[in-house]
Image (cartoon, rainbow, N blue to C red):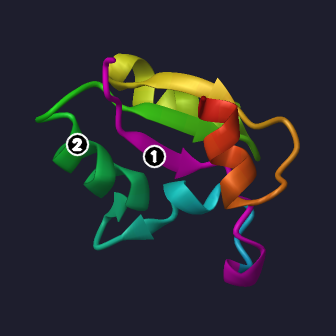
Amino acid sequence: MERKVIILAAGKGVRMNVAIPKVLTPVNGKPMIEYALSAVEKICKPVVIVGYKGADVEQFIGNRADFVWQVEQLGTGHAVACAR
């Protein structure tokens, strides 16, 4: 069985009070997801779970990952189930 790394990036970031997907929020000048991608892509091509404004996340990441859509944001467990 092939193993993959899943990056959860579907959340809205309600508590962060931002209009963009929370994973695109800059931290030290880079979107948060960039740190995860940089670490993981040394090992494999990750699977990124997208949802809220997922097209924006896909556009930022490009072909650096495979994507799975979590159409309804029903929590972390549901996001992982979508990846399966």
* Tag 1 and tag 2, C-beta contact below 8 Å: yes
Name the residue beneath numbered marker 1: 7
What residue is shown at x 45% (from left), y 30% (from top)? 47
Q: Which residues are magenta?
A: 1-16
Q: Secondary structure at mark 2?
A: helix
What distance separates the C-alpha of mark 1 from that of mark 2? 9 Å
Q: Position of residue 50 (x, y in %)?
A: 64, 38
Task: Give the crowd class for mark 2: few <14, some 14-19, many >=20 residues within 10 Å.
Answer: some
Earlier in the chain: of badge 1 and badge 2, it is 1
Query: If the image is split into quadrants, where does the C terminus sit?
Result: top right
Task: Give the crowd class for mark 1: few <14, some 14-19, many >=20 residues within 10 Å.
Answer: many
What residue is shown at x 67% (from left), y 80% (from top)? 16
Specify whether residue 17 is painted magenta.
no
Q: Position of residue 19 (x, y in %)?
A: 74, 63
Task: Specify the label residue 40 is tagged with.
Answer: 2
* Amino acid under disc 2: Val
Q: Position of residue 56 (x, y in %)?
A: 62, 36
What residue is shown at x 44% (from left), y 41% (from top)? 6
* Amino acid under disc 1: Ile
Q: Taking 76 as reference, is 5 above or below it?
A: above
Specify whether residue 10 is painted magenta.
yes
Residue 20 in view (yes/no): no
Q: Taking 49 as reference, is 32 above or below it?
A: below
Residue 64 in view (yes/no): yes
